[in-house]
Image (tube, helix red, strand yellow):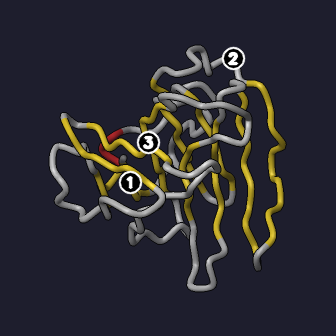
Amino acid sequence: LLATLGSYAQSSPNEYYGVQERSKEMAFIDEFEDNRNDWPLGSYYLNETMVGGEYKCESRASHTYSKTQQVAMDIAGDFEAEVRLRLARGRTSTDFLGLTFGRDAQGNEFSFVINPDMTFQVYEYQQGRRYSLVSWTSAPALRLKHGYHRLTIRATQDTWYFFINKEY
């Protein structure tokens, strides 16, 4: 999990490598070698472990269960957030995982998620209701149903760019 801040004005933000690394300032990184960022482990709904650079969550419930970790980051300016993840098992299109960002004190937030159907969605959760910003859409970059995937969100000026496996 990686989050960076910076000024991306002199870049090509719609290209994965279009923003130079030197223009980024690291805001948060977790490679899951240990639990230095205090991820809550163990709950009634989830079997959670952190071993060998992987944070694993397995639902004990018959439904999907959300797991988040708060990272202090101002999304009003330019930013980039990235996660490398894998859905080890998934039964239906209701099983999904991804990156949630921009959560405010009222619980309003945005999410960029993928599911076992090899599709993605971007949605906003606002005042208890979910609004689709990008409806479930197939993505050629999602090549392996249960393989690792890299999801990246980049914001420059007032535009958001979404990458799946480094593809725009």
Mark number displayed over residue 4: 1
Label 3 Cα crowd, 10 Å radius (few <14 / some 14-19 / many 20+) = some
Q: CA distance from mark 2 to mark 3?
A: 18 Å
Which residue lies at the image location 57% right of the left edge and 43% below the top edge?
Answer: 97
Query: Which sits earlier in the primary sequence, circle 2 or circle 1?
Result: 1
Name the amino acid type tagged 1. Thr
Query: Which sits earlier in the primary sequence, circle 3 or circle 1?
Result: 1
Q: How many marks?
A: 3
Which of 81/67 is in front? 67
- Residue 113 in the image: state x and y as whole percent: 63, 43
Q: Is residue 168 above or below residue 32?
A: above
- Residue 129 in the image: state x and y as whole percent: 81, 70
Name the amino acid type tagged 3. Val
Mark 3 vs mark 1: in front:
3
Question: Which quarter of the figure has residue 58?
Answer: top left
Q: Which residue is mark 2?
A: 140
Which of 93/150 is in front? 93
